[in-house]
Image (tube, rainbow, N blue to C red):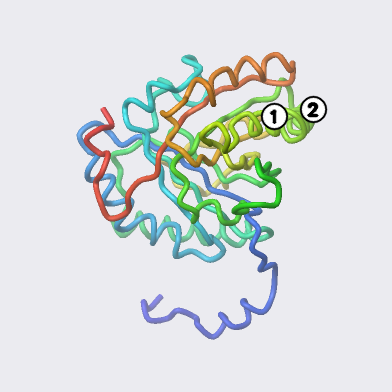
């Protein structure tokens, strides 16, 4: 196909049909470990090229943000034996993206196509490992302050100072709905109330997603998603650096989930936002 052939005549037709709301019905959550000695090259490639060409420029992906775990943040992670990250410190960069509700299929067709093209054109950085990468469907958002404050569709644009990635596995596929209901109705509201603004503030909201399987024609360097039938992924958006009161705010999540009898925590991992256009924190990863 000629590079000038963009088939622009169909753009207006496509814009006139299908869902076009603002809710994050789906997410791409991807935690990656650059190979030793390639940290700077990976950071520049991802930020200068891939974040845009391989993500934000795609149809229906309407918000994105990158996060980083410096070595001291990596050492706060638990449990030590994680089904998600081996070792638990693996995956020092996290990228989160929102996809318009009802547009997963269309976006997925585009993302497979563009990544094949980027790979063919030598625009894929190979010296990295995908530790935890999955497209996910939105299940719930729980807010600390009710109707006040940013909504989940603002979360990747609002200047939150930190994020905690939590991955929970239900005891069985049949019990995931029960686990979700306990998280949404009991556990998360209680936890958010305990980290309110009166205590110096930490989490303002938690979004809950469930992973979906990647397509069979995905790129070979991305492994198939595990736990599709049992797993839930939680993103805690923080108004303070997670290091300020880590044990107070986020210690013991694994014990509370285990005590419910509904599941087990496989990862609790804190991050802070990257600073776009810079290599800040790259020399603090190891």
**177 with respect to 105 (left or right):** right
Residue 205 falls in image quadrant: top right
Foreground: 52 or 213? 52
Q: Residue furthest front?
A: 198
Which residue is tagged 1? 190
Neighbourhood count class around disc 2 (C-alpha, 10 Å): few under 14, some 14–19, many 20 upward: few
Q: Is residue 115 above or below residue 170?
A: below
Residue 232: percent from the left, percent from the top? 64, 33
Q: Residue at the spot x=29%, y=57% of the render?
A: 48
Mark pair 2, 1: CA separation = 25 Å
- Tag 2 near tag 1, CB within 8 Å: no
Q: Is residue 108 above or below residue 207?
A: below
Mark 2 or mark 1, which has the lower sequence index? Answer: 2
Dot 1: element: helix
Q: Residue at the spot x=24%, y=46% of the render?
A: 279
Q: Quadrant of the C terminus?
A: top left
Which residue is tagged 2? 174
Q: Quadrant of the N terminus?
A: bottom left
Q: Residue at the spot x=50%, y=82% of the render?
A: 8
**54 with respect to 227 (left or right):** left
Residue 226: percent from the left, percent from the top? 58, 31
Dot 2: element: helix
**249 with respect to 127 (left or right):** right
Residue 79: percent from the left, percent from the top? 51, 17
């Amino acid at each position: 196909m000629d590079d000038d052939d963009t088939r622009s005549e169909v753009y207006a037709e496509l814009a006139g049909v299908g869902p076009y709301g603002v809710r994050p019905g789906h997410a791409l959550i991807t935690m990656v470990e650059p190979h030793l000695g390639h940290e700077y090259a990976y950071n520049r490639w991802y930020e200068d090229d891939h974040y845009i060409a391989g993500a934000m420029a795609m149809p229906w992906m309407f918000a994105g943000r990158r996060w980083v775990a410096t070595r001291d943040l990596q050492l706060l992670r638990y449990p030590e034996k994680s089904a998600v990250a081996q070792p638990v410190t693996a995956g020092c960069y996290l990228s989160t993206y929102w996809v318009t509700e009802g547009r997963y299929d269309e976006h997925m067709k585009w993302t497979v196509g563009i990544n094949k093209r980027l790979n063919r054109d030598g625009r894929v950085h190979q010296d990295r490992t995908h530790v935890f990468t999955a497209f996910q469907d939105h299940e719930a958002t729980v807010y600390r302050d009710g109707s006040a404050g940013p909504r989940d569709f603002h979360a990747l644009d609002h200047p939150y100072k930190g994020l905690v990635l939590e991955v929970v596995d239900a005891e069985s596929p049949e019990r995931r709905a029960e686990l979700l209901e306990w998280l949404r109705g009991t556990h998360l509201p209680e936890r958010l109330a305990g980290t309110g603004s009166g205590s110096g503030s930490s989490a303002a909201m938690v979004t809950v997603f469930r992973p979906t399987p990647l397509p069979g024609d995905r790129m070979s360097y991305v492994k198939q998603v595990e736990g599709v039938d049992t797993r839930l992924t939680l993103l805690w958006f923080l108004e303070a650096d997670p290091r300020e009161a880590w044990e107070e705010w986020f210690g013991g999540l694994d014990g509370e989930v285990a005590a419910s009898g509904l599941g087990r925590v496989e990862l609790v991992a804190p991050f802070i936002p990257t600073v776009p256009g810079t290599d800040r924190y790259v020399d603090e990863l190891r």
